[in-house]
Amino acid sequence: MTDDREGPRDGRRHGLRTQQASCALGTSTAMAGALHEKLSIEDGKGVLLFAPSTCDLDGLATELSRRLGVPMFGCTTAGAIGPDGWTSGVVAVAFGGDVDFDVFPIELERRAADLE
């Protein structure tokens, strides 16, 4: 689908380029392949993944990062708004373009004691 206001589902603002894609749940390899086909961002800086808790997010991030050559970040969600509306699958937002920023991944671990 094409959004005539901004081109093929990408955003361009001050050199920053974004692109969004989604896919159904499956194996990490299948999901990475489906997202890789849909994400064609140039000068990639990173990809933000939103996935259900049943998804192998580590496996998906590893496989997609191998294919795209950029860092992956992600979180779990009970559902997300993708390019075609609400989905219970995976949504990916790729960032790139002529921008100068650094990405510093950190891992957060939630513990029951922290939530009280």
Image (cartoon, rainbow, N blue to C red):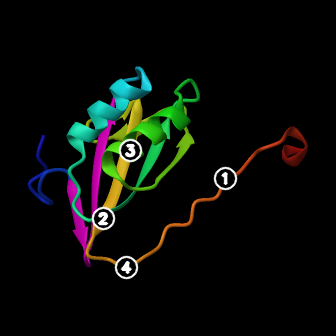
Q: Which residue corresponds to mark 3?
A: 66
In front: 4, or 104?
104
Note whether 4 is above or below 28 in the view shown: below
x%, y% of residue 84? 26, 36
- Identify the residue position indicated by label 1 in the image: 107
Residue 23, percent across and down? 32, 30
**Residue found 35% across the figure and 34% down from its top:** 32
Q: Number of marks in the image?
A: 4
Give the quarter of the image for residue 25.
top left
Give the label on residue 100, or none: 4
Question: Do we see residue 88 in this rendering?
Answer: no
**Residue kind at label 1, given as amino acid type:** Glu
Nearest to viewer (mark 3 / mark 2): 3
Taking the view exactly as shown, the residue that stands out farthest to the top is 26
Please report the residue visible at 86 percent of the width from the left and 39 percent of the height from the top: 112
- Tell me the distance, in whole angstroms, between the alpha carbons under discs 4 and 3: 22 Å
Q: Residue 17's spot in the image, x, y percent?
A: 26, 65
Q: Is the N terminus in the top left, top right, bottom left or bottom right quadrant? A: top left
Q: For the C terminus, which image quadrant?
A: top right
Q: At label 4, which amino acid type do we have? A: Asp
Give the magenta range.
10-23
What label does residue 32 carry, if any?
A: none
Residue 22 included in the magenta stretch of the image? yes
Which residue is located at x 29 percent, y 48 percent? 20
1 and 4 marks in contact (CB < 8 Å): no
